[in-house]
Image (tube, rainbow, N blue to C red):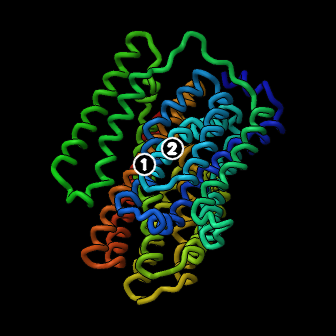
Amino acid sequence: MHQTVTKQIDSSRRWWVLAIVVAAQFMFGVDAFVVNVAIPTIAIDLHATPAQIESVIAIYLIAYATLVVTGGRLGDVHGTKNVFLAGVLGFTLTSLWCGLAQSGTELIVARLAQGATAALMVPQVLATLHLLFTDEQRNRAFAVYGIVLGLAGAAGFMLGGLLVTLDLAGTGWRSVFFVNVPCGLLIAGAASRIMPSVPRRAGTRLDIKGSVVLFAGLLCLIGPLLFGHDVGWAPSLWAVMAIGAVILAAFLNLEHAVGRAGGMPLIDLTLLADAAFLRGLGAAFFFFLANLSFYLVMTLFMQRGLKIPPLEAGMVFVPLALAFVVASRHSGARARHRGTKVLIEGCALQIAGLAALALVAVYVDAPTPIGLALTLIIFGYGQGLVMAPLSGAVLSTVKPVAAGSASGMYGTIAQIGNAAGVAAIGAIFFAIESLQSSRAGFLVSLALFVTLIMICAAFLAWMRRASARS
């Protein structure tokens, strides 16, 4: 299928296709960060509780994580173009719903729907890169992808603070969702004209049972983390999480049964025999566990603890995001020569950046936005060295026929990490903030982030050894 697709379009047109799919990835990335900056304002306007604050971010990630494997598999079955278009249009409509929400509960439900449509859209981005570009072109394509991730962060931070501050036509925080509507329509129009069609696989059906079981298992495992603080970490929450773990174990047994019966499991079971891929997923999980949760805690500390206004708080992240872009540009060439060593170096730089940030929080009573922004540059550069080549490194041993399933699994693990991090570390921050202060909660969170990144580096080294043996 890989050779068939690449022969359909000439080399120059491939880069136009790349521009379209990474534009969708850009919109998805902006949405994650723009909401982070706007969340304190949303909480005030909708009178949201701490659990609702976390849920607005985490429920979106949970929906995405539980359905992204299904989205990747749908791309394998029905063609990446068709599923991509459905995802983009769905994301556009649900963004409009988010902007029109009148209560915290309605916004959470709308964000659930938005995450579900993102799960259709985003897996097709990595699958398209994997299918359209040959080995010598793939590093360039993934470098562009990494740069777009960084630019999405910068744009999200700036746009969130700017839109909340400008209060366009009295829409306030709602405009951070409304901005997706014209962008989504433009992307869908361009994709319908330029993206190549990939023939669906004849005689295949989606594993609906697997989708339902995976959704239920992950929701039970992650969902209780959101409300633990509000209900005093009641024993029933831990029971629900244990049930979620049992359901996920049953999911793997179900997938093997579907495969033995000659069906098409939700995940490509051959991927489970790829040691390098599985270890790479472990690295991705711990990396993303400390990813979006860092930005949530940093935003809450600045706006709630240091009383920095939304626009200035958003601008604090801009040098970080630009350093991320520079690192993404460097990481492609360095990864070709040094492999996964570059990712491990990136982890070390992130730890150094977090240590510098901790020193500022301990020894400076009232850190200025400029001082915080300069301190974050080291962390941003290190994060760019890891995130940009990480997806390519994890998928490097995957055969093209399993690209959709593998990218879906990668997306699931990444967003499970993001959701679990927001829920767990966010809950720890709120608990310590209520007992002591925002600064104390921030420092404990930084220690957790350092620990998680160290574990990520260990998995990367483990993955490197497996790749060398294969």
Residue at (42% x, 48% y) in the render? 59
Residue type highlighted by circle 1? Ile
Residue at (49% x, 20% y) in the render? 206
Residue 12 placement: quadrant: top right
Tell me where residue 177 appears, x and y as whole percent.
Answer: 60, 55
Residue at (58% x, 78% y) in the render? 312
Tell me where residue 82 appears, x and y as whole percent.
Answer: 66, 28
* Circles 1 and 2 in contact, beta carbons < 8 Å: yes
Residue 311 placement: quadrant: bottom right
Q: Is residue 322 visible?
A: no
Residue 161 vs 272, above or below: the answer is below
| Disc 1/disc 2 C-alpha distance (Å) | 8 Å
Residue at (63% x, 57% y) in the render? 152
- Label 1: state its secondary structure: helix
Residue type highlighted by circle 2? Gly
Residue 170 vs 197, above or below: the answer is below
- The residue labelled by disc 1 is 59
Residue 46 placement: quadrant: bottom left
Q: Label 1 neighbourhood size at 10 Å, few (<14), some (14-19), many (20+)?
A: many
Left or right: 247 as drawn, with respect to 288: left
Q: Quadrant of the N terminus?
A: top right
Residue 164 vs 192, above or below: the answer is below
Tell me where residue 43 appears, x and y as whole percent.
Answer: 44, 65
Q: Earlier in the sequence, mark 1 or mark 2?
A: 1
Q: Nearer the viewer, residue 140 or 26?
A: 26
Tell me where residue 270 appears, x and y as whole percent.
Answer: 45, 24
Q: Label 2 neighbourhood size at 10 Å, few (<14), some (14-19), many (20+)?
A: many
- The residue labelled by disc 2 is 115
Which dot marks residue 334?
A: none
> Which residue extends farthest left?
235
